[in-house]
Amino acid sequence: MMNVFPRLLIKVKSIVENLNKLISMTSRYNIEMVGVTKVLCGDVRIVSELVKSGLKIIGDSRVKNVEKFKSAGINVEYMLIRIPMLSEIEKACLLCDYILVSEPKVVEEISKVCSETGKVQRLIYMVDMGDRREGVLFERAYEEILSVSKLKKVDIIGVGTNLGCFGGVVPDEENLGNLVKLAERLRRSGLNLKVVSGGMTSAIPLLENGRVPNGVNQYRIGEAIMLGTDATNSREMDYLNQDTFTLEAEIIEVKEKPPKPSGKIGRNVFGEVPKFENGRMRKRAILALGVQDVDIKGLIPLENGVEIVNATSDHTVVDITEAEREYKVGDILRFRLKYKALLRLMCSGDYIERVYLDS
Ligand SMILES: *Cc1c(COP(=O)(O)O)cnc(C)c1O
């Protein structure tokens, strides 16, 4: 194991166990699982293990990641889960088996591209059931989907929705039930819809207590596989592993400092006016890690008495006054991660060493 910091310890086995657990939970209801890998920023090593252990469809938001997985020889089906830019449609159609869409203009362009290549592109039309990110408003969905379904070389195989991610709306029997009803109405009008893609991590509670509306037959899951958590419902699943990713960062300074800066206060490097409490001297450590690498709000210290104060591009200041351990320069602090913190760390590229354990 290389002693290079900061580094991410990745327990591949824990991630694979999470996947297997979720596959067995969904298959009990004949629900197909799409494993969403966007947080991994194209990590071939982890994704190939997921596929080896039975994942059939990979969902990613970036065409570039799909391209990377494919050229690494990972042969599964791929779903592009972000609406494609007009500028990437050709590539998206070439590489992806399924594409999520929400704009007639995008479907028209896909239809044009495929008329030239001969491919029939399978699409899932996204419907906004209340979360207010992507998707045609539920009230307008029937007309819009019916009209794009007449375009050539595109096959609208289903409808889908995204909940929880943006507006924090919790998936339930009502909003997902309405999505199923929309699919049924479209079927009565002649569309051959096979898929109702209704689940994300935030919809796992419905699986747990058997309340997934009849007709929902696909879940696209990311966070629960990677972290064993559910941010929307703010919980950890006790049947999943949370020890999947651990961040280790090195201390480069330890000093006693007054918590309040002295001098006239302007704005900090990010244009904010920082607020500080007056008080007794604190013991502070600086980690060689910054906002360039991580979202510090998503760092969960693994040792007691460690509190994150703030960070700049390359420095993270932590308060260790209450810590049990006597920290010194060169020591390593360890953290568990929330989703956004993990995302940034994975995308910080060469600056973060990755150590794959037990794979
Ligand atoms: C991120 C994303 C998912 C997965 O959501 P999780 O909360 O990570 O399970 C599913 N669908 C779409 C469209 C997404 O963007």
Image (spheres, rainbow, N blue to C red):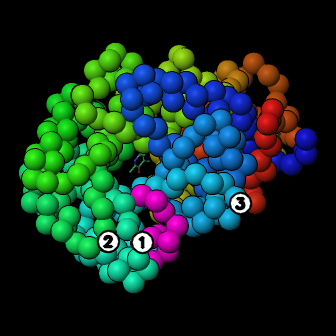
Q: Decide: is 253 above or below 174.
A: below
Give the percent coordinates (x, y) of residue 63. 52, 66
Give the percent coordinates (x, y) of residue 259. 61, 39
Instruction: Work out how far the residue at label 2 is from the one at label 3, CA to CA, in angstroms.
Output: 29 Å
Assess whether mark 2 and mark 1 are in contact (beta carbons under 8 angstroms): yes
Label 2 neighbourhood size at 10 Å, few (<14), some (14-19), many (20+)?
many
Stretch of the chain drawn in magenta: 90-98
Is any atom of residue 293 visible in this view?
A: no
**Residue type indicated by callout 3:** Ala
> Which secondary structure class fits the magenta region best?
helix
Label 3 neighbourhood size at 10 Å, few (<14), some (14-19), many (20+)?
few
Nearest to N terminus: mark 1 or mark 3 = 3
For disc 1, the marked residue is 119
Label 1 neighbourhood size at 10 Å, few (<14), some (14-19), many (20+)?
some
Instruction: Work out how far the residue at label 1 is from the one at label 2, CA to CA, in angstroms.
Output: 7 Å
Which quadrant of the figure has residue 26? top left
Q: Residue at x 59, y 61 (%)?
A: 65
Q: Is residue 274 left or right of residue 85?
A: right
Give the percent coordinates (x, y) of residue 16. 65, 32
For disc 2, the marked residue is 153
Q: Residue at x 37, y 25 (%)?
A: 29
**Residue type indicated by callout 2:** Lys
Q: In front: mark 2 or mark 3?
A: 2
Assess whether mark 3 and mark 2 are in contact (beta carbons under 8 angstroms): no
**Residue type indicated by callout 1:** Lys
Q: Residue at x 48, y 63 (%)?
A: 96
Q: Is residue 129 left or right of residue 53?
A: left
- Which mark identifies residue 72? 3
Is 174 colored magenta in this rendering? no
Assess whether mark 3 and mark 1 are in contact (beta carbons under 8 angstroms): no
Q: Decide: is 165 above or below 135.
A: above
